[in-house]
Structures are given as structure tokens and as C-alpha cells.
Amino acid sequence: MLIWKIPAEFSRRFVLGKVRALTRNGPYTKTLPTSLKKIMTFNYYHGTSSIFLNSIIENGLGGINPNFDFKNLDLLKYLSSRAEKDLMENQNYLNVRDATLAMANQTDLAVPMPNGKTFYFNYRHDGIYVALTREKGAIYACKNKYGSEILEYCIRIFKLIKEKDKFFELPKELNLFKIEQYLDYEQKPILIEINGVKDDELEMENGQMAPEILNNLREIIPKLPKREKFERLQHINFKLLKPVPFERLKFYELEYESSPHFRDLDWTMTRIKPVGNNVYKK
């Protein structure tokens, strides 16, 4: 085994697989063996809303999935079925019909792009997903008014059906989340920073395990220009395979003015410390 002996008077720090030291004779740099390289770690980000804050504090991120535990997905399936019967002449429904059906059926949505290629949007909600960049998490939190695509579409379709039929009521056995209470709810977009997630606790959107992808990123990210690095990381999401406890989460309340889309979002974040049913800004 090869061991690197470094004089005691060196002031050492590890930077991307190299040891750099200041010696009495000037700077000293030596590439480390692979076994001694410091592994690049990642923080992950999840965008949600204040609607889910108390649940995350109590159960951790991923401890409860309202799409299944509160039957929000089943409710969307019911609403989309009603919409297919009652709203086929409603332009507001037709504008979101493809996304609604993809979400209800938990499939990808193929969208032709101007360059002739096809982009596939993932509308599967079989777990809690996290992003590799703070910006991606913030966009999701600001773009989805209720912090959940399925909840947002449930409320959107419910309102459209209610406009046509004022006597329409939701089935109680499917409406465990009681979505009516959120129709005019003044929520705040919330960004969650997640620390200490191991590579094997993550899965890619296509079902591939994350370690291979993350190790590949560790190799190429240090070599990329700043802009290209941001672009590459912006489009990578992972599914959490186990809940993350409250103690490993940091919470930020977001404020934004511009359109919540990539490149256009102008936003600020304020660290908050949730304690019980109260939230304190730091």
C-alpha cells in the first residue's frame, strides 16, 4: 500500500483529490491516490409549501406521502374521469388535459420540441423527489402553488367542475386531505435543504440506482465550466428511498416576483426554524 508522508509543518487541506500545502519553501501540490481522495458530497433540495410543513417536521421528509397516504392520487383519478365527461368543451381544462391524464395515469408525457426532438416529462409520483441544485428546488416550490402537483391539479379540476355544477361534492372516502380548506389558503413556498443523504439512499427517475451517476458526476463536475456545471446539474432529480429525519433538514421561506420558470425566476430565501406549530425566521 502506498502511503504519502507529509511533513508535520505543512498546513493541509484536501481539494478535489489533491493535497495542497504551504511549506517553508513555497506552495506544494501532489495528486493523491484514488483511495485517499476526499469524496465530493452533495446537498439535495426539495420544493414544497407551508401546507406540508408540520407533517414534514413531525414525520421527516418522505415519512408521509399524501398522494398515497391521503389518497390524493386516487382523488385526481376520480376528478380526471369526471372532467373527461363534463369538461371536454372547457378550454381551461383542455389546456391542462394532457398533463392531468399523464399525472392521473402516472406516466411520462411526450412533448414535441421546436428542434424536432421529443422531451419526456415525468408525471410519476411514486415517491419524494429531490434536486441537485437550490435553483431547481426553488422553481418547483414557486411554480406549484400548493407544493404538490397532484394537490394543485386536484384543486384546479375541482374548481372547474364546481363552476359547472355548484352541487358537485367530492367523495369523502377519497377526500381525506379535505382539499376544500386549501382553495383560498395563503401558503408560502418552502425550500428544504437535505444533508447527509447516502448515495445508495437515492434512485434515478428511471429506476436506476444513484451511486453510478453520482460517481460519474464527481469525475466530470470539477472539469466543467461554471455555467455548464449548473446546466448539467439542473436537470437531474432523484427519488428518496427512505425518509430523512427533521434534524437533517434546513427550511427556507421563499419570496419571488418574476415568473417561476428556469432562468426567469427572481427570488430570495430566508432561513426559518420550525418549532412545534410555529415558525421563526432566523
Image (spheres, helix red, strand yellow):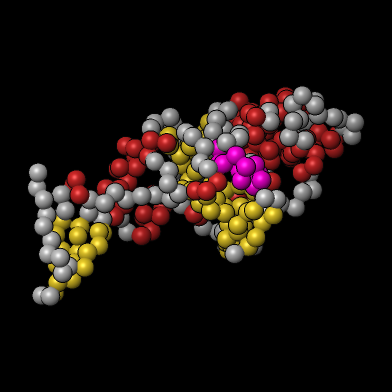
Q: Which residues are magenta?
A: 52-62
Q: Is residue 124 left or right of residue 19?
A: right
Question: Which quadrant of the structure image shows residue 154?
Answer: top right
Which residue is drawn at the image coordinates 41% and 52% (left, top)?
231
Magenta highlight on residue 55: yes
On the image, the x and y values in percent for residue 39 come to: 29, 49
The total number of labels drawn is 0
Q: Is residue 141 left or right of residue 237?
A: right
Magenta highlight on residue 264: no
On the image, the x and y values in percent for residue 112 come to: 51, 37
The correct choice, above or below, for 271 with respect to 242 in the image is: below
**Between residues 203 and 110, which one lies in front from this camera angle?**
203
Query: Which SS type dominates the magenta stretch?
Result: helix
Q: Is residue 55 left or right of residue 88?
A: left
Which residue is drawn at the image coordinates 61% and 25% (left, top)?
105
**Between residues 88 and 81, which one lies in front from this camera angle?**
81
Q: State the quadrant of the N terminus.
A: top left
Q: Residue furthest right?
A: 167
On the image, the x and y values in percent for residue 144 come to: 64, 46
Whether residue 196 appears in this view of the structure is: yes
Which residue is drawn at the image coordinates 79% and 48% (left, top)?
184
Q: State the quadrant of the C terminus.
A: bottom right
Whether residue 112 appears in this view of the structure is: no
Which residue is drawn at the image coordinates 64% and 47% (left, top)?
53
